[in-house]
Amino acid sequence: MSKQDESVYTDFKDKMTYSDYLQLEPLLTSQKRLSDHHDEMLFIIIHQVSELWMKLMLHEIRGAIESLQHDQFQPAFKQLARVSKTQAQIIQAWDVLATLTPSEYVEFRDSLGQASGFQSYQHRQLEFLLGKKSAHILKIYEKDPSLLAEIEADYHKPTLYDEAIHALARAGLFTDESVLHRDVTKSHCSTTSVREAWQTVYQDSNRYWDLYQLAEKLVDLEDWHQQWRFRHLKTVERIIGMKAGTGGSAGVHYLKSVLDDYFFPELWELRTTL
């Protein structure tokens, strides 16, 4: 044994280990296959990993919202940049799931019952915080009142984009009162005043440097999210074709329909008008 090996700490009778800190036992024993098919393990782990990444994204987006409320732009930039890097990881996860063939998936698909990724409450919370609001979807979570209350809280909160628009107004850029005091339980719709405010930012980026950087961070985030949607679409099409989803959604048809949804529409529109 080398001297370097001898220096490694080995007495953990009364000490916290790496496994203890990360709670690896519950984490690594939570993959419960409902069939005997080998590839169900892949299916479970990919979705669990994605949920862990979404938990981090929610943590960072909430942090960015709080930072923007206090005009603390630099922390918000760091938090949003981390969200974008995390989105890249989730996108790559589809490449791993795409190794699952249709003949393999059909062997255990019935074991899922009506369970579906469409029901992911963390994904729903992400959509709510980014700006896509839908009251109808809340019915899915009535089974768990405490969870429903948590999701409803995000449904009733201003979005990340709402806070960005308020930052525009605080910087002296005209924004309609109807936008600043809008019903935040509805999805944001493009307005002329917001588009013109962002256009002013882009036309005088030196003066509005923080807002200019914020706009580009938001565009990064939405760009990655659209790429995630597209990879989701193609992976589902590759594995189940045009079948309906296990949770009753229209499957590929639904995924195609949301490709044209925008969280921050004015930031994309101004690229044409600049």
Image (spheres, rainbow, N blue to C red):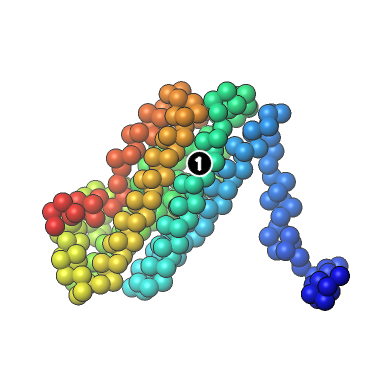
Residue drawn at x 35%, y 72% is 73
Residue drawn at x 60%, y 26% is 104
Check the picture and name the quadrant holding the N terminus: bottom right
Query: Closest to the observer: 193 or 20?
Result: 20
Residue 22: x and y in percent read: 68, 60
Taking the image as shown, residue 23 lies to the left or right of residue 262, namely right
Does 92 sit above or below residue 97?
below
Q: Say if residue 16 shows up in the picture.
A: yes
Does 116 sit above or below residue 160?
above
Query: Closest to the observer: 71 or 221?
Result: 221
Check the picture and name the quadrant holding the C terminus: bottom left
- Which residue is tagged 1? 95
Name which residue type carries label 1: Asp
Q: Say if residue 66 shows up in the picture.
A: no
Q: Residue furthest front?
A: 2
Does 199 sit above or below residue 10?
above
Residue 86: x and y in percent read: 48, 56
Taking the image as shown, residue 272 lies to the left or right of residue 136, namely left
Residue 98: x and y in percent read: 52, 36
| Crowding at mark 1 (Cα within 10 Å: few <14, some 14-19, many 20+) | few
Residue drawn at x 20%, y 70% is 205
Taking the image as shown, residue 29 lies to the left or right of residue 102, namely right
Residue 204: x and y in percent read: 16, 70
Query: Closest to the observer: 69 or 13?
Result: 13
